[in-house]
Every structure is written in C-alpha cells, then in structure tokens.
Amino acid sequence: MSFKEILGQEKAVALLKGAFLRGRASHAYIFVGPAGVGKSKAAISFAKLLVCPASRQAEPCDACPSCRKADAANHPDIQVLSPDGQFIRIDAVREACRRLSLKGFESSTKVLIISDGAALNDESSNALLKTLEEPAPDTVIIILATSLKAMVPTIVSRCQRIVFSSLQESVIFEVLRRDHGVGEDEAFYLSRISEGCMEAALRFHQEKVFMQRNRLAAAWMKGEVGLLGSQGRGASPKKESRQETEMALYLLAGWLRDILVAKISAEKKYFINADRIDDIMHLSRKLNPEVLEGALKLVAQTTADLKANVNMRLALARLNSELQKIA
Ligand SMILES: [Zn+2]
C-alpha cells in the first residue's frame, strides 16, 4: 500500500505529504468524503509513512520491516479501531487512547485510525475527546468519515479536515481496466453508473451488473420492454430479491434516460449506455417521448416505493403494465 495507489485525490495526498515534509503533521485528522474513494488507503499509507524509518520524499520505503508490518496490518504502533456492531465501544476507545499515551514499541510516532467516525457515539466520543484535547507527543489520530454531520461537533472541531472528493469517471475506468482487468465496454458503463464511488463500481462488477444490462438491452431490442425482460411482467419476486429489483430499476432508469437523450443528441459522451448507442438510437426513433418520460417517472416512483417498503409485487405490476404502453 502506498500513496501511488490512490488515484484522483491529488489534493488530499499533497496536503498530507506537505505536512509530513515540513514536520508538521497534525495530531488529529478527519478524512471526509464518499465511500470508496481512497480514504482508508490514504490513512494506511500516511500511517506507514509516519512510522517508516527509511521514508524518502514523503513516500514510505515499502521495504523495511516497519513497512512490511504496516502492510500486513500488524504494526504495533498503528492501531485501527472499527465498530463492534453499530458503534465503537467506549472501552475500545479508552484502550486505544491508553496505548497511544505509552512509548512507541518500534517507532517514536504512534498512529490510531478510526475507520468510521459516525460509529463514535456520545460516550466513545467523550472518551476520545480527552486525548484530542491533550494529545501525547508524537501521536496522530485519523478519523475516516463519509459525512461530518453524523459526528459529535467537538470532535470535528479538534481535527484537521482533509477532504476526499468523488472520483472522476475516467479514474474509475482506469482502475477497473488496469487493476481488475475489466473489459473496455463494461469499465466504461460501470464508471458511468457508480457515481464517483470505486467501491460501488467494484461491487457492480462482482454482481455482474453489466451482463444484467446486456440482458435488458437484448430484451428491449426484441420488443420485450419489461423491467428486465425476464423479471417482472406480473411476476412475484421473492422477498430477498428486493435489492436485485432496486438494481434492475436503476439500470432501467439509465436505459430509458438514454433513449430520451437520443431524441436530442447522438453524441456518445452524453450516454450512460454508450456501448449500445446503435440500439438506443433505434429505440429512440421508434418510441414516443411522452410515454418514455411517463415510464421514467414511474421507475423513480417505484424505486422510492420499494425503499419505503410498499408491496413490491403491486408496485412492479403497475410499472410493468405502464411499460407495456411503450411497445
Ligand atoms: Zn519503510
């Protein structure tokens, strides 16, 4: 693990490296930004840098015993605190802070990474607060958070904020291609639907969302304009498939949107399903925009209904009967 592996967060990484080079690392940081954009990688890389005895130009050496232990998550001077259930327990915070106050085992610097700031409840936040107010020398606490709103304000105010942004589609595309061997069309599609979140892109890859989209496209080209071709159309999906159904609705929304976009532009860059632009253009010429718009609204409504736990069968039946008007 090193800073080089973190893509699309140049500003955040530059701030951390700059502080290290000036010997001015803060005693407490909050890394805030969406899930799956590199906060955790950055925290580990920074911790590794802080304890590496052979770092060069703000990069850990990646070869010394310290770096190897950090990579294997068993460096005695790097603690990682994660929630036990919903919250991080107060005694776990107390123990972590006690260890921070001791002399380092191998390094003079000691690091505590808290993997989810929102999991600090009032009690555990209070326990942490004492250490934040009177930090022991050579200690760095890094709290990861997707939002500051869910955190106790007194904690937030005592930490330096490092903002991590959503990833650019081109970065997600590149990582999928380079690190995960994903095909070009799939990588492009996933980069478009994952909304700047690498974690989501990888999950979609694992769940074979692209294949699902291909089935959807094939069904529509055959005139089967259901939710997924096979699924829906009066079917009674099982309870556990609610998540799958939400995914199917998400893909369908993107599909309908593209057919509507094709009414005004044929430029590839405007499409989510750019690899299927010929199919999209064909459908766009065939289908009535008002009916498409109505269907798109109903897809949004059905998605909201599912989240609100309404009867899924009824909601899908209504959607499918509406979709039949498209054909
Ligand atoms: Zn090293």
Image (cartoon, rainbow, N blue to C red):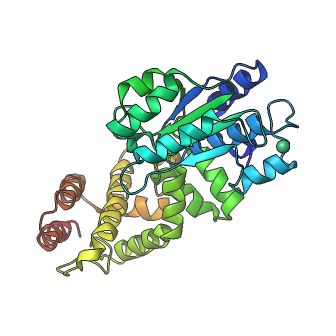
**Quarter of the rendering containing residue 29:** top right
**Quarter of the rendering containing residue 28:** top right
Between residues 234 and 6, which one lies in front from this camera angle?
A: 6
**Quarter of the rendering containing residue 282:** bottom left
Between residues 96 and 70, which one lies in front from this camera angle?
A: 96
Q: In this view, does 196 lie above or below 72?
A: above
- The answer, for residue 167, to whether it is visible in the render is no
**Residue 286 location (% of width, % of height):** 31, 63
**Residue 41 location (% of width, % of height):** 64, 46
**Residue 210 location (% of width, % of height):** 49, 67
User: Which quadrant does ligand 1 occupy?
Assistant: top right
Between residues 102 and 237, which one lies in front from this camera angle?
A: 102
Q: In this view, does 197 lie above or below 278?
A: above
Q: Which residue is drawn at 59% across and 59% down?
A: 187
**Residue 280 location (% of width, % of height):** 41, 60
Quadrant of the frame with the C terminus = bottom left
Between residues 125 and 22, which one lies in front from this camera angle?
A: 125
Q: Residue at x 64, y 65 (%)?
A: 183
Residue 218 lies left or right of residue 166; in this view the side is left
Residue 288 lies left or right of residue 228; in this view the side is left
- The answer, for residue 145, to whether it is visible in the render is yes
Q: Residue at x 68, y 65 (%)?
A: 181
